[in-house]
Amino acid sequence: MPRPQGGGRLATFVAALIAVSFVVLGYLHQYGIHIPPNTLPWEPVDLNAPPGWIAHWQLRALSRDGELCRAALRATPLAIQPLKDQRIDDACGFENVVRADRSPVTFAPRTTATCALTASLFWYQKALQAAAQAQLHTRLIRIDQVGTFACRNVNSEVTGPRSQHATANAIDIAAFHFADGRSADIERDYGKATPEGRFLDTAHDAACRLFNAVLGPRYNRQHAAHFHLDMGAYRMCR
């Protein structure tokens, strides 16, 4: 039997270290020692607390369990309305979708998306508020989004795989608006050495810690004017 190469040994070591860490944390929790929320994978996700290093794992769990996901959202300041599942064809339609009628930051228009994507967006708003304070010294008050559900292929190609938009599992964000009247427009400000440009850089990096795929102007020209964020099966940060 071939011996594992260096990468295999490193992966095995990391997996063992993670397992030991969870065991230690579990013992500490059992004996009443406070463990921050969103630290133990077997504990319920707390969307009101900051996401931890298992955020992607927790969001995947929410995507698999609609009832659990909706319960997590109802414990937040969000006002959500679950929608009926809809099927257009074999590759288009959605299930476990909610409409967010109220959120800490206003979305224009309001979002209709999968429950897990909505949970990610709730966490994302907190990261965006921190970025607004750090880079612009003001509050974020509105996010302009240009679509969640659309029955189309990736990049609107005639052939090819369906986009995550085909199942309402993605959102395209075009601009951010702030309490002092300024805005950060992705097409206008991305990549510039300005407070707005730096905010967009931070917003992009923060998205990569929550969403599975994050695509922006660096990826291709189809994304020159927006950030694409989705909760699909593939991890990308471009």
Image: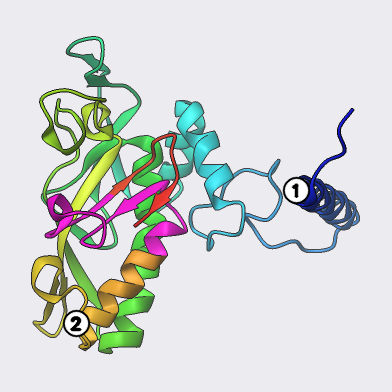
Q: Quadrant of residue 112?
A: top left
Q: Quadrant of residue 167?
A: top left
Please tell me which residue is depicted at 21% across the width and 19% down the height of the picture.
92
What type is the residue that disc 2 sits on? Lys
Query: Between disc 1 and disc 2, whose residue precedes?
Result: 1
Please tell me which residue is depicted at 18% across the width and 28% down the height of the picture.
153
Density class for disc 1 (Cα within 10 Å; few <14, some 14-19, many ≥20) is few
Q: Which residue is mark 1?
A: 11
Q: Within the magenta stretch, is there residue 215?
A: yes
Q: Within the magenta stretch, is there residue 102?
A: no
Q: Position of residue 229 (x, y in %)?
A: 30, 49
- Alpha carbons under labels 1 and 2: distance apart: 38 Å
Q: Is residue 237 left or right of residue 169?
A: right
User: Which quadrant holds the C terminus?
Assistant: bottom left
Secondary structure found at label 2: loop
The magenta region covers 206-228
Closer to the camera, 6 or 171?
6
User: Which quadrant holds the N terminus?
Assistant: top right
Q: Is residue 19 above or below residue 201?
A: above
Q: Is residue 229 above or below residue 51?
A: above
Q: Is residue 196 above or below residue 69?
A: below
**Is the Cβ of the residue at disc 1 closer than 8 Å to that at disc 2?**
no
Please tell me which residue is depicted at 77% across the width and 45% down the height of the picture.
8
Seen as rendered, the residue at the extreme top is 90
Residue 58 in sight from this viewpoint: yes
Q: Position of residue 145 (x, y in %)?
A: 15, 53
Q: Is residue 75 above or below residue 150?
A: below
Q: Position of residue 42 (x, y in %)?
A: 71, 40
Seen as rendered, the residue at the extreme front is 2
Q: Which residue is mark 2?
A: 192
